[in-house]
Each structure stands twice: as structure tokens, then as C-alpha cells.
Image: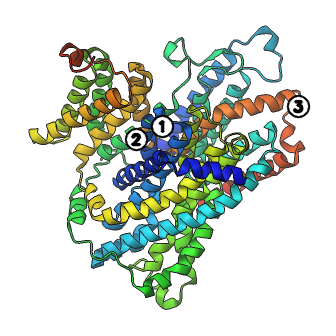
Amino acid sequence: MRINLSRISALIFLLLFSIYSYLAGEIRVFSFDVDAPFNAKTFPKLISYIGILFSFLALVFSKNEDEPVSQFEWLKVFVLFVLVFTYGLIIKTVGFFLSTNLFLIIAYYYLGVRSIKLILFCSVPVVAGLQFMLHDLLDVYIRDPLLQSIGIIS
Amino acid sequence: MIEGITLGIGAAFSGYNILMVMVGCFAGTIIGTLPGLGPMSAIALMIPITYGFDPASAMIMMAGVYYGAIFGGSTSSILINAPGVAGTVSSSFDGYPLARSGQAGKALAIAAYSSFAGGTIAAIFLLIAAPQLAKVSLSFQSADYFALMCVGLLAIAAFASKGQFLKAMIMTALGLALATVGQDSLSDITRFTFGNINLMDGISFVLLVMATFAMSEAFMIIFKKKNISFKASDASTKKLGSIKLTKQEVKEIAPVVGRSSILGFFVGVLPGAGATIASFLAWGFERTIAPVKERLNFGKGSIKGLAAPETANNAACTGSFVPLLTLGIPGSGTTAVMLGALLSFGVQPGPRLYVEQPEIFWAVIISMYIGNIVLLILNLPLIPYIARILAIPQKILVPLVLFFSVTGVYLISFNSFDIYFMAIVALISLVLRVIDYPMPPLILGFILGGMMEKNLRRALIINDGSYSFLWERPISLTLFIIMILIILIQVYQGLVKKN
């Protein structure tokens, strides 16, 4: 049996469903529900058995082929992931307008757009348009300390 | 029924809902045209926008997005041989050679007319079949529903996973497991939250769909270094040629459209089969029955070879609404997303929908006719402009998709935790997609999880904890046999492949 990505992933799922099965057993149910035909544990336990069964079958019956993964852009995706994460981190404190524009501008620049006009054209009007639609047309309140401080939104 | 149809016509033909269809078709076409973004991503991106709407208008708009995305997928398939969705892969077999021979306009027009005809004929079938099936399904009990959902999950895993049945079943189990996070609906006991208050209400359906489709798709575009914009800009700026068809050409494709509509609709009704299988079957069928001389032209720019898959994939889209509207069971990944959206509106599709909210049931069916007409009227003259969308470079497209995904999720909860969680889920989805784990079974498992637990609970309590309900009732016994057959087919196929 050769080790390949499919087998490693199946093994991870096998472990994951085993932990899930253990946690399902640990769910606290009401005392009058312990011997009931169905309680909060029943369905998760059933799922864990299905998950364990199919992960085990995938582990045993996966093809003996190695999938090439080296030619992919792992770093770029990771940077974008960090960027999304940071966006989530600052959106409340910095506000929707500024944080979203920063997110878009950095993402465009990182992915290779070098024209400042294009970067600004594809960020500021898009964000302003969406914010106007949400705030003024659909009555969705978006917290934005910056725009509030300069009196653009109430 | 007549009363329901009248209500549906009233709702579907209201100015507001016609506008919704138009917006949906247009937005769907634009998103579907972008290579890599299919109907699931398109619908996922539109969900947050529909939250302020009433359920009928939202559903009508999403149906329009679905059609539009399929049509948009055909455009990229025909012009640059880069199908946006799997359902339009077979359209590129003959559509791309036609475009290369200077008849891109004609190819796109055939695609539009065939899609219109397929969608319209299938909508008539839906009008006839849906109420009948809804009446039959009123006799279903919890045990039957549970068995039916098991069949749906197995069928999606078996037929929509490109030969990766075991991986698809793991994803189904993962989807079901994710559905159990949060408070148990009956006892209010919290499960798998690890003390995190953000998980008390469970994982948001929109978050999961956005992360596994829209955001992970954006990551995938970067990840696989797909740079098709140069080719795209080339295709969008060159002359498309005439969009007029001759009488002879119309005569040639008319019977193909009829046959492919019937085939597409019935394939679409089957859980898991959907537009992809329907379009391949239609193309293969037409090629088989064509005279030897014409058969040689298939794959080299045959108009029949283009009309068949285009008709079938649209008919299948309509067909996939039958199990969704009548049984409350989605037959495909896209209708699973729609089911999730409906549930979040407080609408439970199924036989009761036909009885209790006929205006939604019929408005959706009738809006499909309108959607097909809108696609034809709105999109056909706009083809040269829609083609230009293909020229949007990925370095602009990717940040925009990420932005709309994040904003869509954030605007529902205004909780930063959802953004972190979404980014992590998207990254995991990307890794899983790279090693061929299909995502639709995960979404279907997640959406059906709550309903399955509810029906299993009822069935087990009625049967005093015994699983014999699976073979004691005729309906569940039939479904149980189908489940076994699906598994046996998979085992057989696995053995054949191995040998």
C-alpha cells in the first residue's frame, strides 16, 4: 500500500470522525432521555459510524497514484487568506468603507495590478456604490466610524 | 390547482417580480460567463442581496440567476473553450469549433434558442408533473422522508462525484456532521460548540456555501495559475459574425431540441444526475442516431451537436426543481443551495408548500417561462457585450469575488468571527478540492442534516427505537432497495475499474 495524498486525507478523516464519535458519546442528555429511542446523541453517533466506515474504505481502496501538487501557487493563496483574515480583524474598528477599500487595493496590487487609476476605479466606486445601496436603499446599517466622523452617514 | 395557477400568475407577472427575473437572469449571465464561477457560486453570491425580499420574489430571482448562469457558462464554453460549469462542457465540443470558424454569433444564437426551447418545454412538463408528485408525496411519512433523503444523498455521491464515490460519501458525512453543530432543535442541548458562543446557533448556511464555492473558487483561480484573460480578450474583441439562422438550420435543429428537452427533463428529475449528465447524454444520443455523414461532423462544429447539450442542460435545470418543490429534496448541488436559501426565509419546500403556499409554488414555476423569455430577449442582443466580460483579468476578478463573499457573510451577522471561520473553511475546501473531494455532497449533507434528524427522530419514536421502518413500509422499502442498488452499482463499477 503506497502512501499518497488520498490515503493521507482518508486517514485524517478517519481520525476526525473517530474524535467526532467520541465527542458524540460525551454529549450530555437529560436523565429522562438517556434510554429514549432517540436523543441528542443518536444522530451524531450514526453520522460518525458512516464517516468512519467510508474513511476506512477510502484509506484501503484509494488508487496508488501520486498527485502532483508542487506546481500550484500556495504562497499567493496563503497571502490572500491572511488578507481576508486581517480584513475581518479590522472591519469593525476601522469601519466598512476604509477597511474594504484597503483590502481591495492591497489585493489588486499584490496580484499584479500596477495602474493606480485602475486600482482606484475598481475599489472606491464599487465599495461606495455597495455601501450606498445597503445603507440608503435597503436600510442595512453598517457601522463606519470614519464616515460617521466626517458626517457622510448618520 | 386552477386557483393556485392564477395566484402564481398574479405573483409572477407583478412588475416587481418581472424585474427580479430580469435582474436575476442578467446577474446570473454575467457571473456564469466568468470562467470558473458556476450557478452555485452565482446563487451563493446573490443570497445576501435577497434577504430583504419576500420568499416568492427571492426564489424567482434565484431561478433567474440559475438560468442566467447556465447561459453565461455556454458563452465562455463556446467563445474560449473554457466552460464555466460542468453542464456546458459538451457545448464546447461543437460550439468552440463553430466559433473558430468565424460563426461565433451563430453558435451563441443556437445556444440561446436551444436553451429557451429546452427550458420552455421542460417548464410545461414541470407544470404537469409537479402537482401530481406533490399529491403523491402527501402520503409520505417520516420514515419515508428519511429513506428518501438517504437515497438523495447516496445518489448525489454516486452520480455527481466523477467516480469518487468514497470521497463523496466522506463529504456527505462531513456535511451531516457540520449540521449537528449548535443547539439540538428539540432538547436545546448544545453539541460540538467547544464553548464558543458564536457556534451556538450552528454554522451559517450562507457562510458554508460562500466559503466552499465562491471564496474557494477565487482561491482556486489563483492557486491553479489559470490565466485565460488573454485568450478571453482576444475572443471578445474579434467579430462574432451574424446571429441569424437559416430556415434549413432551424429545420435541422427542431427535432433535436424536442428529443433533448424530454431527455434533459427526465434526467434532471433524478437526484444527482443534473445538467452535466443530461448534456453529455443528449450529445451522445444525437451523435449515435445521426446518419454516418453527419456523425463525422460531431465535434467539428455540428449545429445539432451544439443544440442537443444546450437544450438538455436547460431542461435538466427545470427538471431538478421537481424533487425540490414537491418533496423538499434537492436533486442537485444548485437546488440544494436554493433549498438552504428557502429554509432561511422560513419556507419549507415539499408537498405542504403546494397546499399551504401555492403562490410561491406556482410563481416559481411560471417565472421559469418568464426567465426563458427574458434570457432570449435580454441576452441575445447583448451577446457581444457579455462576451467582453470574459476580458476581465483574474487579478481584478479574484479580489472582487473575495470582497463580495466576505461582505455577503458579514452583512448577515455583523460578526467578525464569521469572516475568520469562512476564510478557514475556504482554505480547507481548496485543499479538499485539489485532492478531488467534491463539494456538492457536503452542502447537500449540511442542508438535509437537520431535516434527516427530525424525520429519523419521529420514525424511531413511532417504531420504539427499531430501524425496521426502513423495510416495513412499501415506500421506504422501495427506497431502501434503491439505496442498496446504488451501493451495489458503485461496488461493481469499482471492481470493473480495478480489473
Residue type at mark 1: give it.
Val
- The residue closer to the viewer here, B337 or B244, is B244
* Relative image position of residue B281 (x, y in whole percent): 57, 69
Disc 1 and disc 2 in contact, CB within 8 angstroms: yes
* Relative image position of residue B314 (x, y in whole percent): 52, 62
Disc 1 and disc 3 in contact, CB within 8 angstroms: no
Q: Quadrant of residue B435?
A: top left
- The residue closer to the viewer here, A50 or A134, is A134
- Could you tell me which secondary element the residue under label 2 belongs to? helix
Q: Mark 1 or mark 3: name the one nearer the start of the chain.
A: 1
Can residue B164 be seen here? The reply is: yes
The residue positioned 27% from the left and 60% from the top of the image is: B385
Q: Is residue B35 above or below residue B122?
A: above
How crowded pointer 3 is (Cα within 10 Å; few <14, some 14-19, many 20+) is rated as some
Residue on which disc 3 sits: B463
Q: Mark 1 or mark 2: name the one nearer the start of the chain.
A: 1
* Relative image position of residue A18 (x, y in whole percent): 62, 26
Q: Which mark is residue B214?
A: 2
The residue positioned 21% from the left and 69% from the top of the image is: B238
Badge 1 sits on which subunit?
B
Residue on which disc 1 sits: B209
| Number of numbered discs on residues | 3
